[in-house]
Amino acid sequence: MTDTTIAGPDRPFIRTEMLTPQPPPTAVSGFAGWARQNLFSGPMNALLTLVCAALAVYLLWVFIDFLLLRAVWTGTNREACIAPGVGACWPFITNRFGQLLYGFYPADEHWRPATVFFVAVALIVPLLTPSAPYKKANALLFFVAFPIFAFVMLHGGYFGLRTVETRAWGGLLVTLVVATTGIVASLPLGILLALGRRSKLPLIKFVSIAFIEFWRGVPLITVLFFATYMLPLFLPSGWTIDGLLRALVGVALFSAAYMAEVVRGGLQAIPKGQYEGAMAMGLRYWPMMLLIVLPQALKLVIPGIVNTFIGLFKDTTLVAIVSIFDFLGIIRAAFADPNWATPMTVYTGFAFAGIVYFVFCYGMSRYSRFVEERLDTGHKR
Amino acid sequence: MKKILTALALGASAVFASGAAGAATLDQVKKDGVLKCGVSTGLPGFSNPNEKGEWTGLDVDLCRAVAAAILDDPTKVRFTPLTAKDRFTALQSGEVDVLSRNSTWTSSRDATQGLNFTAANYYDGQGFLVRKALGVKSAMELNGASVCTQSGTTTELNVADFFRTNNLQYEVVAFQGQEETLKAYESGRCEVFTSDSSQLYALRLKLANKDEHMVLPELISKEPLATAVRQGDDQWFDIVKWVHFAMLNAEEAGVTSKNVQEMLSSPNPDIRRMLGVEGNFGEQLGLTKDWVVRIVGKVGNYGEAFDRNVGAGSPLQIERGKNALWTKGGLQYGPPIR
């Protein structure tokens, strides 16, 4: 049977050309489709969506109304902010901005912490940007040269710089110093402790376990209190240790213990075959750990590591125990100034503190997502 | 921003500063050239950092006066903000030499905390805050009132005692924190707000319209806020005590920071003895002859310090009340310098 004619009485129509592809129906595509599938897939979900949206809009409105629309922007003392119905009292913040950043650091020396801050940003941004060149030189500058530079600049006493005691430091400066020192010190220390805890040498294993369990077993606040008020009773008369140093060492050791357990979790997730494979290649302990095991283990626990960092950043407020006013501490102390006592002072101060802490913590969280995605090798589902 | 090397460098610079508990605090202060003073972490009018980052307040001025008497410079004070929990430990361990931190003088603290209270620089007591519209002039008229207070504090117990002793009816509305209690009072949950009266004045500033509220004159508890020093150094105890008395005596004699230089030529024997023109009373204490001139000239007398920090010259507007001189019906009484 041959088909000489395409159309005929028994075959009224045959399509000769391909259909042009049509866009999917709007019911399942675009924003409308997405919303329909995810937000309004049933009466219950639709109701929940509407309630949550209303709540979100209301809260957003409350914040904008308080922080911006009803806010007071200028003024020199409490008189500016005591009118009925006003919102946030921003002159309270702007008036004390220097104090919030640097604490009791002498006003004519504020350029020193400011310089340190800008140098830190200039070094840390290329260090965290994968495409930036000269990583080794950059790391060397940041981890070796910068701490010395920062210490000389902040503490002074060299090159004709006036000595500024650490007890005069405060505000965001102290928060960043404590957090950065803790973060940078705790990761290597934590890795060593985690490896030590899994070591086959009994002494190393025992020391690591004792260290980790001790520091995890006592509250940081107790450690700081002990170091500040009890230690001087035991030390020979005339010995004191700088208050900020006590806090720095306490925070670093403390977070190292937590970090060790996070890293150990990663080490335990690496299959035995990886170790055996590495050993079969003839690698000794350290090359095996550094080249095969740790890169995989650390990648697995990035969320845990960043979790510890963020917790540490917020824990820095505990240095108030050693009579150092960190960022939150200096805001709270400012509440006591009768010249600024208004109904709105406390709300404004805490709102500002919340915004600043959120910026830093959210920044860390986003960067960790970025690193995770960059290092993703397909284990993720 | 800084690394572990910083920590090491800080360690190397760990100062070999003054010693812990022991005698001769005066010598140590002179050697260091700085007085270590414990203050609160922020109490309006008593110790709080101002906009320039300097500590100000009535408690702060006492430390500045001690520094002025010893070192001739009221700025040579190192202030250590202390919480209520660590204040006494800090004094014992030598972190501070003077504790000028609104601490109530009680027998148990005097006996068991290893410290000596020198003198009360502010007589506080629990008071009542009411709306002026209520038309109440005295706490005795508070029959049937609802009282906002912080739960679980001695404040609550004092209120109960007061109303029971005076056979008055009342209703307690208790809250957890001070801010919440104040908000409850402001929103009309109760007619009376009670707390330490110095606190009432400070909290009143946080009300939307402070002039609609007033603090009643009665105080229903004794809260003498006193300065404390470590036990075991009697010379130091004397110095801190007499610095306060000197400020009182100066006010009583009318010697102020403005007229102290002219007063040096005053014929009044009391003033001549006080200012060191006659006798060597300062030297007996281990200070210099002109110790009162230094204190009053650089910090002021008690009345000036009171006005500037908590009184008429400050937003707090606290009346002298019990803190007036004994000659004006108050309790502040400086023993004679002679």
Image: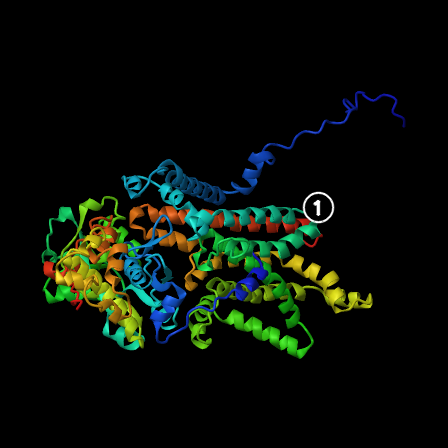
Classify residue A331 as left or right of residue B150. Answer: right
Q: Quadrant of the N terminus of chain B?
A: bottom right
Snapshot quadrant of residue B163: bottom left
Q: Chain of mark 1?
A: A
User: Nearest the camera: B249 or B36?
Assistant: B249
Quadrant position of residue A205: bottom right
> Between B207 and A264, which is closer to the camera in this rendering?
B207
Residue occupying image coordinates x 22% and y 65%: B120
| Quadrant in the picture for the C terminus of chain B | bottom left
* Number of marks in picture: 1
Amino acid on which the number 1 mark rests in the picture: Pro
Residue B270 percent coordinates (x, y) = 14, 63
Residue A123 percent location from the top left of the image: 62, 48
Question: Which of the pair B112/B97 is nearer the observer?
Answer: B97
Mark 1 lies on residue: A133
Mark 1 surroundings: few (<14), some (14-19) or many (≥20) residues within 10 A: few
Q: Is residue B137 visible?
A: yes
Task: Determine if residue B123 is in view.
Answer: no
Residue A237 found in image quarter = bottom left
**Left or right: A322 in relation to A215:** left
Looking at the image, which residue sits at the far right?
Answer: A1
Image coordinates for residue A135, horizontal then vertical, percent? 69, 50
Q: Is residue A47 placed above or below B130 in the rendered structure?
A: above
Task: Give the residue drawn at x 21%, y 66%.
Answer: B157
Q: Nearer the viewer, residue A61 or A381?
A: A61
